[in-house]
């Protein structure tokens, strides 16, 4: 019985240490390309979605863009050798929207259509 308990504990600790070593990053790397998800919570309508898509597609090294308006997220596949995660966020903030914890560029935000501004503004 004592032996069995030892085995159970060994398996338990192995499982815990194995899960602790898993990378926490949500990014996925495929042959020099990386896919990331950026929270764009300030989007209000279809125009916002198109504006965010357009801004991201203009960035050098961006391969694919998928914007989910309902979820408030943009999924971007890019080549890290050509651009950075931070540049993607900046492209969004320069278009007048929030990107993760980065605030929208105030001038770009002012120029947005009224329907694209936050309900409280
Ligand atoms: Cu809008």
Image: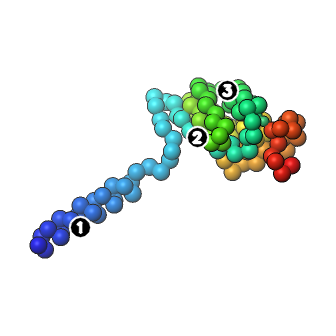
Color scheme of the displayed model: rainbow
> Element at badge 3?
helix
Q: Would you say residue 81 is visible in this rendering?
A: no
For residue 63, side relative to residue 29 (left or right): right
Q: Position of residue 53 (x, y in %)?
A: 69, 30
Q: Would you say residue 75 is visible in this rendering?
A: yes
For residue 15, side relative to residue 87 (left or right): left
Q: Tell which of 4 and 47 is nearer to you.
A: 47
Q: Position of residue 84 (x, y in %)?
A: 62, 37
For residue 67, side relative to residue 121 (left or right): left
Which residue is identified by label 3? 57
**Residue 43 found in image quarter:** top right
Which residue is identified by label 1? 9
Along the polypeptide, which appears first: circle 2 or circle 1?
A: 1
Q: Position of residue 87 (x, y in %)?
A: 68, 37
Assign the N terminus to one quadrant of the image: bottom left
When the figure is inspected, residue 21 is found, relative to residue 95, above or below; the finding is below
Rounded to the nearest angstrom, the CA distance separating label 1 from label 3 is: 51 Å
Which mark, by number, is residue 37?
2
State the count of labels: 3
Regarding ligand 1, which quadrant of the image does it lie in? top right
């Amino acid at each position: 019985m004592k032996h069995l308990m030892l085995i159970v504990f060994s398996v338990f600790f192995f499982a815990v240490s194995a899960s602790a070593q898993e990378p926490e990053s949500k990014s996925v790397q495929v042959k020099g390309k990386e896919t990331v998800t950026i929270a764009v919570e300030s989007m209000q309508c279809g125009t916002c979605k198109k504006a965010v898509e357009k801004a991201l597609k203009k960035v050098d090294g961006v391969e694919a863009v998928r914007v989910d308006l309902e979820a408030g997220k943009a999924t971007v596949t890019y080549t890290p050798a050509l651009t950075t995660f931070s540049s993607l966020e900046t492209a969004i903030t320069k278009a007048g929207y929030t990107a993760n914890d980065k605030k929208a560029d105030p001038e770009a935000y002012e120029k947005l259509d009224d329907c694209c501004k936050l309900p409280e503004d």
